[in-house]
Image (cartoon, rainbow, N blue to C red):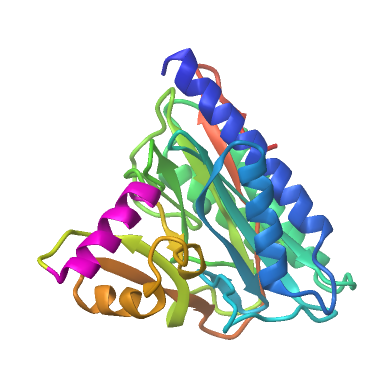
Amino acid sequence: MNDDVLEKYIRAGSITKDAREYAAANVRAGGSALELVDAVEGLIRSKGAECAFPVNIGVNEVAAHYTPSKSTDIRFSEGDVVKIDIGAHVDGYPGDTAVTVEVGTKNHAPLIRAAETALEMCMQMMAPGTTVSAMGEAIERAISSAGFKPIKNLTGHSMERYNLHAGMSVSNVKNRDRSALKEGMVVAIEPFSTTGVGKVDGGSRGGIYRVMRDRRAPPEITTFFSRLQSSFGGFPFAARWCEDLHPNASSLLPRMVRMGMIISYPILVEVGMGLVAQAEHSVIVTQEGCTVLTR
Ligand code: CO
């Protein structure tokens, strides 16, 4: 990796970290999720980066892939376990980080700490040659020994320019995957701990989309599609970001999903309706070990 690319990853990581800290400090009972994500995404842009995906807000048993819109906004309540997952990119080079906060209470501190400890355990062992299997085992052991379950069908992921899932998936449980880290890889590690059964399933649509493929379509759709492609590339985007790109965006998006031109992510909910906590950092693998980009 050349210095220019490294510098962009470092800047993206640092801006993502600032956004995470701002978000964690501004979740409060009665607060609107939409107001929070608008502020966080505004902060990312004000620092000269772009969002690598819409800010995800996961409350209690919701693990991932919900972002608020005007029509689907929620308000936080005292005692909620709130995950905030944030991505920013500089010239396509992404940073990805997440934090869990409990609104006004401390009843679930051990659940939150389990995810954070698992993340630390994993990062401590990351170096060229560390296998996916070994990382999953470390995460699983940390969460299980705290008395919770890791979510087995959510994973960390290697990242590249304009690509959040660049090939390597880092399981949150031990598996048979012997693929190993290499120097220069950038990887987001994201353990999820739960009081439930340790699995998520897709439910209703969460307002997050991604461009898939161009298709023959009416001119209105073709024009909108190329704007989506040039604005977001391979990164996920929110319906609420599209108002400026096309006046009929809200009706075109579902049509384009049906045509296979874009996909819409389902909201991921813990199957046993358990509470879910998450911790996440983006890490670059170095010659000796790793450097955390979002600390
Ligand atoms: Co991630």
What residue is drawn where x is 42% and y is 42%? 158
Query: Toward which corner of the image does residue 216 lie, by quadrant?
Result: bottom left
Query: Toward which corner of the image does residue 215 lie, by quadrant?
Result: bottom left
Give the answer, above or below, for where 108 lies relative to 113.
below
Q: Is residue 150 left or right of residue 184?
A: right
What residue is drawn where x is 62% and y is 79%? 61
What residue is drawn where x is 83% and y is 56%? 25
**The magenta stretch spans residue 107:** no
Q: Nearer the viewer, residue 40 or 266?
A: 40
Is residue 53 visible to the viewer in this orientation of the structure? yes
Query: Toward which corner of the image does residue 211 lie, by quadrant?
Result: bottom left
Residue 274: image x %, image y %? Answer: 63, 81
Magenta: main secondary structure: helix
Q: Nearer the viewer, residue 87 or 116?
A: 87
The outermost residue toward the top is 3
Q: Is residue 279 left or right of residue 206?
A: right
Give the answer, above or below, for where 107 lies relative to 292.
below
**The magenta stretch spans residue 225:** yes
Is residue 98 visible to the viewer in this orientation of the structure? no
What residue is drawn where x is 80% and y is 71%? 108
Q: Is residue 60 left or right of residue 109?
A: left
Tell me the magenta residue range.
217-234
